[in-house]
Image (cartoon, coloured by chain):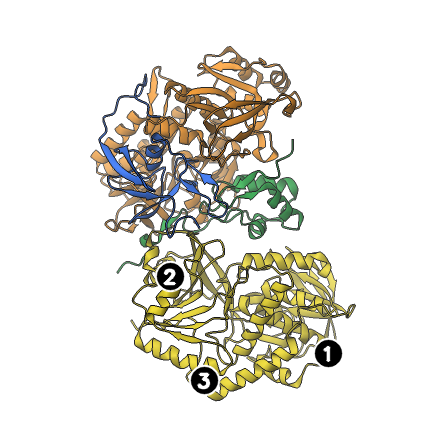
Chain colours: A green, B yellow, C orange, D blue
Amino acid sequence: MSDGPELIVCRCEEVVVREVLDAVRAGCRTLQEVKMATRAGMGPCQGRVCRTLLERLVTLEAAPPEGAAGLTKRLPVHPVPLGQLVEEE
Amino acid sequence: MSEPRRLTLLKLGPDAGPEAALAAAAAYDELEAAFAGSVRSSARSGRGRLVVVGGGIVGLMSAYFASVRGYRVRLVERLSPGGAASGRNGGGVLVLGHTLDDVPFNRLSLRLWAELARAGVASELTVSGHVMLAFSEQEAETLRGAGELYLAAGLPVEWLDSSEVRRLLPHVTAEQRGGLRCPVDAQAYPFRAVSSLLSRLRDGRAELITHTRVTGFRVEGSRVRAVITEAGDVEADAVLLCAGPWSAEVGAMLGLPLAISPRRSQILVTERVATRVVHPFVTGNSIYLRQTHAGNLMYGGGGTWESQSFDTSSTTTAIARLTTRFLEVFPAFRGVQLIRAFAGTVDLTPDARPLLGRADGWENVCVAAGFSGHGFGWSAAAGAIAAACVARALGHEEPAAGVSRLLEPLAPCRHAPAARPQVRGG
Amino acid sequence: MRVDAVVVGGGPAGLRAATEVARRGGDVVVLDENPVFGGKLLGQLHESHAGGWWRGWEVAARLEAEARSAGAVLRGDAGVWALEPGWRARVADLLNRGDQPAAYEAGAVVVATGACEKPVAVPGWTLPGVMTVGAAQVLTNVHRVRPGRRALVVGIDPLALTVARQLALAGVEVVGVVLPPPLGLNADAGSVRATLARLGSLASLAPTPWLRMAAAALESGLVRELAARVGPPGGVRVWGVPVHHRTALLEVQGDGRVERVVLAPVGADGEPVTSRRREVQVDAVCLSGGLMPLAELPAVLGCGFARDERLGGDVPLHGPDMESTVPGLFVAGDVTGVEGAEVAMAKGRLAGLAVCRRLGREVRDAEIEAARRKLDRARQEAKIEFYPGARQAAGAMGQRWREVAWVDP
Amino acid sequence: MRITDHPLLPALSRREVRFSFEVWELVALEGESIAAALLAAGERVLRHHERTGAPRGLYCGIGHCLECRVWVDDVGTVRACTTRVEDGMSVRRSGFGGRP
């Protein structure tokens, strides 16, 4: 059984297996490049759910270049209401 | 503490006057005559091998326009194409706010972005307009004055009073004192623009050598013969340096004194909200902001926290400061969630104008860098002009005298005396 | 606000660490995203190694009471969105109110953020009614709401079986526990052989001869191969729940919500026999892909990490006193390897003592030694190993710490 | 969907609280999450995907995946799985003009 092409990998942005594989076949070699091409990992969870799936999917298809980082983890580590971020007096 | 300068993008100096504005209008006519329609492929081909160093948006655009002009293009990128500030920026394709010297170039860029979109380069380009908001009577006065000059420079602008601004931006604060609107300014989605250019280039227009570092140049007299990379030598009839903030480092390999310094620029992005709650690009209160086609709100801007380095971490100070300013403009969004902070490195020059043209001392080396935080918007014009500079350097085309005159102030080595041609690593 | 120590995460490790600090006179605040404290303990219900039932919420209540009476401040609905070395914890009130400090300055930080579930991608997994086993556990045991009337559990591992049993106890009709779709991107969660390996660790808890046989099969690759092929074709019952270790879920279907699942037997080659697919009516599907450490704060800080699948994935590299590679940043609980609540408590206690020492309070070597021994003992006594070999992996951390086996966070 | 008789879980006595979801007035039990209260009322669809409109519900249950985010008036976006329902709370599937 193949990895169903229409299977959703990134739930937040509804990115499916086919879109990720197309991106890899078109030349994307890192998760960052796949993200740029497909929006996978750009939703509110910022890849917290799909990161491991994307890593597997991309490495099944192509070897990433040496030393390539996966999806970066950045601030804020989880979503925060803007009202909680205002400068203190 | 002194009041920060809050008219985020307004770069008109005190000496900007009607004459300069009229000159800007005339300059645009020259550029338009020379470059309008240049996204379309000419019949020429086999003009020679161009190696573009740097796969940011300017490098990609340059590769695109050079391939259209008939050059065989190879592009060398150290990491991922568009992976630095080219993919992490506000997406503005703006004219309003620029200096009168730059206005003609930015108008050209706006036009070429639209031509690219029609030619199939997908970028989510939206002619959404751009509003510069005033938060004091003094700022309103400054903007109204600027509006007169921009009109004279050929840019359509109109003044909106506070209630008109609220009709345009339903969630904006009542505290604003009106705004200057330019209806033709546009915005695009950097990820899509980069991805689309990449697929167009890979589609037979250019060879992309990514995740590969340039280590030096092989030269012969005053010509570069090959770009030396980790993956071997890439033979070149001409070389174009488009390495953004890394251009100084690459230029140094050829003894070029490119006066570029890196500076961090931070951006924040929220969860998606209903699309078009903010339609135009908005600047003011020391920030810029826009809503993407997907519905995310993004905001960023300058500030005192910026570092003179390649550090692209996000800082809590910037997150707090930018968010405070954002909520001052749009208090209604205080319950919306921030989902990500990111940062890119912009390539500052001493006069905040790009280094664009042939490099002193080298017959076949051109530079397109130093866009000082506006590289994304500039990139279409930069690519078209850089390709023309290459054609001129190789003796294939002679540009109109008017265009040459406009490019003189952008000479890449203008900020420092050109060293004797020398080479490192070759 | 200035405190001596900030603890991020109010589960067993965080509460235990805070209690140690507070008992020695330290000002300590525990910050948790949830309004209630106890973390994963709150939903836990399984037989304990001491006999009888492990009622996690009772343990949580005791830990919370101990922390409070020692003087620790517990703040819920508090999302720590950034840590700055030195230290400062930036905190958001997730209910967007403005009556609490937005930052705490501290001399040390304990990150005890626990673990989260690995995803299992299944066609239809975004339909309402598809949830992780962890979500099902919280709904059932904390909120007392059934995730559905008829549920399928997907993924055969200790947590999945434990939750399946909890669902059955709560009156949910569990139609079965099956394998996830054998897709490449679900890695070995869908493989019969890897499933048997995982189940081995449960054999001592589950009164099922077949499971004990499977555990024995682990000793030999050949026997494991055989066991994968010859297991009871109709599946087995574990705690009364039907476990079909040779049946895979192919798809979840429904119009706007879960209505049915499509299942198929898995052949000897590991591929589903689609000609024998069948539909089963359910209104909930609970997915289990195993747990992984939730270590975003250490990652953003640039901590060293070590990857070890026996611990659930990437864990912050830490020394014998639970200090990470960033001085003053301590880690405790499942974030340092998925080993369960009792081990987490022991890690928390050790981290708490180490924090006190870092803060300049007197902690005798013997106390640290005792805490380390207690951690060793907790590991030996732990009845469930979430991943085979977790004990050895945790033991190997000391070696790694010395070698500094960095991987990019 | 509520569990009222369980062989091992102790009985709870919880006060009723009233809240609204979209246009419906609902009753919850104090201390339970918004997601649990809605599920007890038979509602699994917490929001619709912003682009495709596909219905979404509770997924991870621990505040990690953000699938269950809903809009609470005067508060903003919250996670229905970890946010306790409160008396008088007005919960909606999304803010700023509803589904885009």
Observer able to see residue C48: no
Q: Residues within 10 Å of mark 3 (few under 14, many from 20)?
A: some
Q: Earlier in the sequence, mark 1 or mark 2?
A: 2
In this view, which residue lies farthest toward the front? D23
- Disc number for residue B322: 2
**Left or right of residue A75: residue B32:** right
Dot 1 amino acid type: Glu
- Give the image location of residue B94, x and y in percent: 50, 70
Q: Residue furthest right?
A: B46
Q: Nearer the viewer, residue C144 or B221?
A: C144
**Relative horizontal placement of residue C25, taking residue B292 as reference (left or right):** left
Report which residue position mark 1 lands on. B397
Tell me where residue B246 appears, x and y as whole percent: 57, 65
Q: Earlier in the sequence, mark 2 or mark 3?
A: 3
Q: Secondary structure at mark 3?
A: loop
Q: Chain of mark 2?
A: B
Q: Compute the Cα span from label 1 to label 3.
A: 34 Å
Say if mark 1 contacts mark 2, CB within 8 Å: no
Q: How much space separates mark 1 and mark 2, taking CA atoms?
A: 47 Å
- Residue C232 position, x and y percent, is 57, 13
> Which residue is drawn at the image coordinates 67% and 62% (left, top)?
B75
Q: Which type of secondary structure does the marked residue at label 1 adopt?
A: loop
Q: Is residue C17 left or right of residue C220?
A: left
Crowding at label 2, few (<14), some or many (≥20) Cα neighbours within 10 Å? many
- The residue shown at (53%, 17%) is C215
Amino acid type for the residue under numbered disc 2: Leu
| Position of B296 relative to D31 (above/below) | below
Q: Would you name the residue on which mark 3 appears?
A: B16
